[in-house]
Image: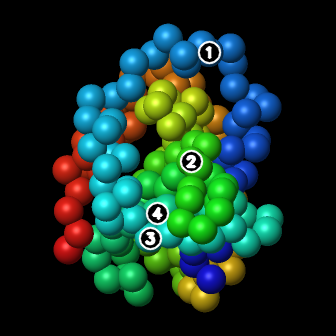
């Protein structure tokens, strides 16, 4: 249930952000330092989930700090793509997500950073948002605001997450 809710939010970023992003030529932006290590960690440690319409196939890593039934932090990186035959996967884009979860008035309050990234490591879109869910993970409210990928706060958060996934080792 949790995974589906998060996946839906990720795909929403992918579609809504595309329509409202200001002009930005990401092709001239270098990949962040350590990008190849992020991809290697996804290949070596990621969990593959096959396509399940309407969701594309994905290889994912998650890092959850703290008890999941109390305030905690979650970070995710996914490469989304298609299956091209047995044991063949073609990545189309990545999402990098960071979430702070807390319980307030009997509901989950989730503050998020969401990033859409090309397979070459260029930051394509960014959003900051919040989600309100029941304690059983039913989404009650979801708000995402597209933010400029050139904003220093956005770049700082993105760089911090890439450094984390670059150094990632399974627990």
Q: Which residue in the structure is indicated by mark 4?
A: 60
In depth, the one of 58 and 150 nearer the eye is 58
Q: Mark 3 points at which residue?
A: 47
Q: Residue 40 in the image: x percent, y percent?
A: 31, 50
Q: Earlier in the sequence, mark 4 or mark 3?
A: 3
Where disc 1 sits, the SS reads loop
Marks 3 and 1, how far apart in space?
A: 32 Å
> Residue at position x 58%, y 49% from top?
90
Q: In terms of secondary structure, where does tag 2 sit?
A: strand
| Callout in the foreground (4, 2) | 2
Q: Is mark 3 on a helix, strand or loop?
A: strand
CA–CA distance in space, label 1 to label 2? 22 Å
Image x and y of residue 87, in percent: 54, 66
The residue that appears at 44% across and 55% down in the rendered structure is 77
Tell me whether the residue at label 4 lies in contact with that at label 3, contact meaning CB atoms closer than 8 angstroms. Answer: yes
Q: Quadrant of residue 82?
A: bottom right
């Amino acid at each position: 249930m949790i995974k589906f809710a998060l996946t839906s939010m990720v795909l929403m970023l992918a579609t809504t952000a595309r329509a409202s992003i200001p002009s930005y030529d990401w092709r001239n932006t270098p990949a962040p330092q350590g990008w190849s290590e992020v991809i290697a960690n996804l290949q070596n440690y990621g969990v593959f989930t096959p396509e399940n319409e309407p969701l594309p196939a994905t290889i994912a890593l998650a890092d959850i700090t703290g008890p999941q039934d109390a305030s905690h932090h979650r970070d995710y990186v996914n490469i989304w793509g298609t299956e091209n035959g047995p044991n063949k996967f073609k990545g189309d884009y990545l999402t990098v997500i960071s979430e702070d979860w807390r319980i307030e008035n009997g509901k989950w309050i989730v503050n998020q950073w969401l990033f859409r990234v090309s397979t070459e490591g260029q930051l394509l879109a960014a959003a900051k948002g919040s989600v309100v869910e029941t304690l059983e993970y039913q989404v009650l409210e979801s708000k995402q605001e597209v933010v400029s990928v050139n904003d220093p706060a956005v770049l700082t958060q993105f760089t911090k997450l890439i450094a984390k996934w670059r150094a990632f080792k399974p627990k």
